[in-house]
Image: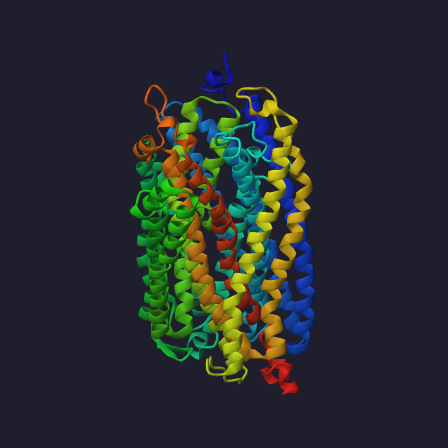
């Protein structure tokens, strides 16, 4: 009996090849994460020393130690949540394949439930860890401050801001390092294997294929999926949660009314997140128990995933109303606005439903179920150049509606509750974080899509029955749709968190008596605005070039192996490539990450110390305004090119291909679309878009937040340099 035939009846323990691939994936994932976290640890220790040194000079040793402690706790918690997610994802890849081996309808249900529940472990563990550690930190530090007064509460939550900084600092390395790692493998495999040698997807003879399914100490797409998509994005949204909570509590502490209302009112931001975990737990039963996936139709599986988001938001809305009515005073003045429980509820609801709207708009522009992506795929008829042109145009256009929605959320929330309202809107968008972490893809810490994608690769590598790959591909296709929703969710929440932290920074400065306003006519502010608008471009250039350099090395290595062993190009030949040759480049990726991290971390510090607080306000405003639009455009452009390729590969343009390229139609009338020039043009677009949607775009989310949280943590340092005017004041 062949492996393909036997695969229908084998379990994970019985299938030697599956077990071998699982061990290889596990070893590769652990190896990369260990290297990544070694670099993170060195950076965390260094930055903790910087915090102690600078904050001690400006605010005293006690404040510095508390802030550094919060920073280290945030970083360690982020690492732990990323590790948990990584282990669950790696373990679930093979289990999802085993579930798909079973005949329908049980095979559909079991493979879906495996991937979905794996995502649930990641989602709930991350949210639970974040909430538990943040609240424990607040309780631990509170006795050292007179939190019953406005000044004491402000100092307490100023120290707590280090927690968010620690989470985002780790996320940056996971996002950038993991993004470079996975996309170098993906691009290299596409160029050297699929385009040059016409090898099919996940062909085990391609040295880059194991990069798609099974890393053994290589630049591996699967490891990159786990590090970037799971650990990196999990840390990204962990940082968003921590930063939004810190911003809301810090701004809320400036309100005498909230402080007088007591501990429960000050902890209102955390109660939103706690209630969100409970709501998401209830919602999860809809996908696995009430409406389980039993059909092969992509729309049926998509519906089960989309239902999670809608039901979570629907159930969360009345819960937020009850929380705001129960925990907040009848009225309170905060950041220049007179807020009420109803207004606070509206702010959270704006973020909650605005995030859903942005997600579905993003899906419209990146799913081949809708016209925009179909137009991009049709443009491949005239070659790769027109595909690139149409994809760029789609990305630019897709920015319009999300920006209008974000602008409306910011304006409405500020009118109702000032900067506190914007912080609550950010928390509202993150309230259903556990659900989003469960179902979403690369730019939203996805589990379902990457687990199913990698499970499909494992099935192909093990040469299991085609029905197994059919199930995993259907789940993967459905996950691609929810991936788009996750991209919009991540970018929108990053923008709101960035603005909330901007407000916390200004509130922190004004609390010291320095009346700070953002005056664009001031030359330092306007200069900072221009520089801040430039930073996302500089940042993206560095990440894109790093992917290009690593991909070049991989292409050279893959072509060398093809030349050295021509048997690799013979179908069904037992020879296999040397997958381990790429291991020596892992350290190079760490080297690439360091200057990128330094740019983000030290830009606001240099601006504040040298040019003063005015330049920092401009820097943050420019970075957020430019970064959110670049992130939306890059993610949607890459997503459109990716799904245009999938649309053609699934036969969406078979009639067109049969007319213009009759040589790819066999004697039975079957269209071999993947042999066509139209498909090769689509692969070129997908190859260009990969680093946009999975490296540069997602990493811009962290840039927006990280610069802002650094400014909050070092606000007193900036004020201590010539009363906030910076070193330049001594020269003028």
Among all residues in the image, which is located at the extreme top?
1
Horizontal and vertical percent for residue 555? 59, 39
Image colouring: rainbow
Across and down, in percent, residue 33 comes to 62, 45
Q: In the rendered view of the protein, which quadrant contains the C terminus?
A: bottom right
Q: Residue at x 65, y 78 (%)?
A: 58
Vertical arrangement, residue 239 with respect to residue 300, above or below: below
Which of 712 and 254 lies nearest the eye of the viewer?
Answer: 712
In this rendering, position of residue 89 left or right of residue 48: left
Is residue 287 visible to us here? yes
> Is residue 248 at least partly visible in the picture?
no
Residue 469: image x %, image y %? 43, 28
Q: Position of residue 703 (x, y in %)?
A: 53, 61
Q: Is residue 114 above or below residue 535?
A: above
In this picture, residue 662 sits left or right of residue 151: left
Q: Nearer the viewer, residue 596 or 372?
A: 372
Query: Which quadrant of the figure has residue 87?
Result: top right
Residue at the bottom extreme, as displayed? 732
Say whether residue 337 is left or right of residue 534. left
Give the number of marks: 0
Q: Quadrant of residue 490?
A: bottom left
What's the residue at 29%, 46% (across, down)?
A: 371
Q: Is residue 584 above or below residue 140?
A: above
């Amino acid at each position: 009996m062949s492996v393909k035939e036997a695969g229908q009846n084998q379990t994970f323990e019985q299938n030697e090849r599956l077990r071998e691939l699982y061990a290889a994936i596990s070893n590769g994932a652990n190896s990369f994460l260990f290297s990544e976290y070694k670099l993170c640890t060195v950076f965390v220790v260094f930055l903790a020393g910087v915090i102690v040194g600078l904050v001690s000079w400006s605010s005293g040793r006690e404040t510095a130690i508390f802030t550094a402690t919060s920073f280290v706790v945030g970083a360690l918690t982020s690492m732990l949540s990323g590790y948990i997610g990584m282990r669950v994802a790696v373990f679930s890849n093979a289990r999802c394949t085993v579930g798909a081996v079973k005949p329908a309808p049980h095979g559909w249900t079991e493979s879906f439930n495996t991937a979905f529940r794996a995502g649930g472990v990641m989602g709930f563990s991350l949210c639970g860890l974040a909430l538990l550690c943040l609240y424990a930190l607040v309780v631990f530090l509170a006795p050292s401050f007179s939190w019953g007064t406005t000044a004491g509460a402000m100092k307490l939550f100023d120290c707590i801001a280090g927690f968010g900084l620690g989470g985002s600092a780790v996320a940056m390395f996971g996002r950038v390092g993991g993004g470079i790692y996975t996309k170098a493998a993906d691009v290299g495999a596409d160029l050297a294997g699929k385009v040059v040698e016409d090898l099919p997807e996940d062909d085990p003879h391609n040295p880059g294929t194991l990069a798609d399914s099974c890393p053994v100490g290589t630049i591996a797409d699967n490891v990159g999926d786990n590090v970037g998509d799971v650990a990196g994005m999990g840390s990204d949204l962990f940082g968003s949660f921590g930063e939004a909570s810190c911003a809301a509590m810090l701004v809320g502490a400036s309100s005498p009314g909230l402080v007088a209302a007591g501990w429960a009112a000050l902890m209102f931001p955390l109660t939103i997140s706690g209630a969100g975990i409970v709501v998401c737990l209830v919602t999860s039963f809809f996908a696995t128990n009430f409406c389980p996936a039993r059909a092969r139709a992509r729309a049926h599986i998509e519906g089960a995933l989309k239902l999670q988001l809608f039901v979570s938001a629907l159930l969360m809305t009345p819960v937020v109303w009850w929380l705001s009515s129960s925990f907040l005073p009848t009225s309170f003045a905060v950041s220049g606005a007179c807020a009420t429980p109803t207004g606070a509820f509206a702010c959270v609801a704006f973020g909650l439903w605005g995030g859903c709207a942005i997600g579905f708009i993003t899906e419209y522009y990146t799913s081949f179920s809708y016209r925009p992506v179909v137009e991009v795929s049709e443009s491949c008829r005239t070659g790769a150049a027109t595909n690139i042109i149409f994809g760029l145009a789609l990305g630019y256009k897709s920015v319009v509606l999300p920006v209008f929605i974000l602008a409306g959320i910011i304006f409405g929330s500020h009118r109702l509750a000032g900067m506190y309202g914007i912080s609550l809107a950010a928390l509202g968008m993150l309230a259903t974080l556990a659900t989003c972490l469960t179902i979403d893809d690369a730019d939203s810490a996805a589990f379902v899509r990457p687990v199913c994608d990698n499970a499909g690769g494992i099935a192909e590598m093990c040469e299991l029955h085609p029905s197994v790959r059919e199930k995993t591909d259907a789940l993967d296709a459905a996950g691609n749709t929810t991936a788009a929703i996750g991209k919009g969710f991540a970018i929108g929440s990053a923008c709101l968190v960035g603005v909330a932290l901007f407000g916390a920074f200004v509130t922190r400065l004004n609390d010291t008596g320095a009346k700070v306003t953002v005056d664009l006519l001031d030359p330092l502010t306007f200069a900072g605005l221009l520089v801040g608008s430039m930073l996302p471009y500089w940042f993206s250039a560095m990440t894109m070039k790093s992917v290009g350099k690593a991909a070049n090395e991989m292409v050279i290595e893959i072509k060398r192996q093809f030349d050295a062993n021509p048997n690799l190009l013979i179908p069904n030949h037992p020879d296999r490539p040397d997958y381990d040759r790429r291991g020596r480049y892992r350290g190079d990726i760490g080297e690439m990450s360091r200057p990128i991290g330094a740019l983000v971390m030290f830009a606001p510090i240099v601006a504040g110390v040298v040019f003063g607080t005015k330049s920092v306000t401009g820097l943050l405003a420019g970075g957020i305004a430019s970064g959110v639009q670049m992130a939306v455009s890059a993610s949607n452009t890459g997503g459109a090119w990716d799904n245009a390729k999938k649309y053609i590969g699934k036969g969406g343009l078979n009639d067109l291909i049969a007319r213009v390229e009759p040589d790819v139609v066999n004697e039975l009338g079957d269209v071999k679309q993947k042999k066509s020039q139209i498909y090769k043009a689509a692969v070129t677009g997908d190859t260009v878009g990969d680093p946009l949607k999975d490296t540069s775009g997602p990493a811009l989310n962290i840039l927006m937040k990280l610069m802002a949280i650094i400014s909050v943590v070092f606000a007193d340092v900036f004020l201590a340099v010539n009363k906030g005017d910076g070193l330049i004041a001594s020269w003028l």
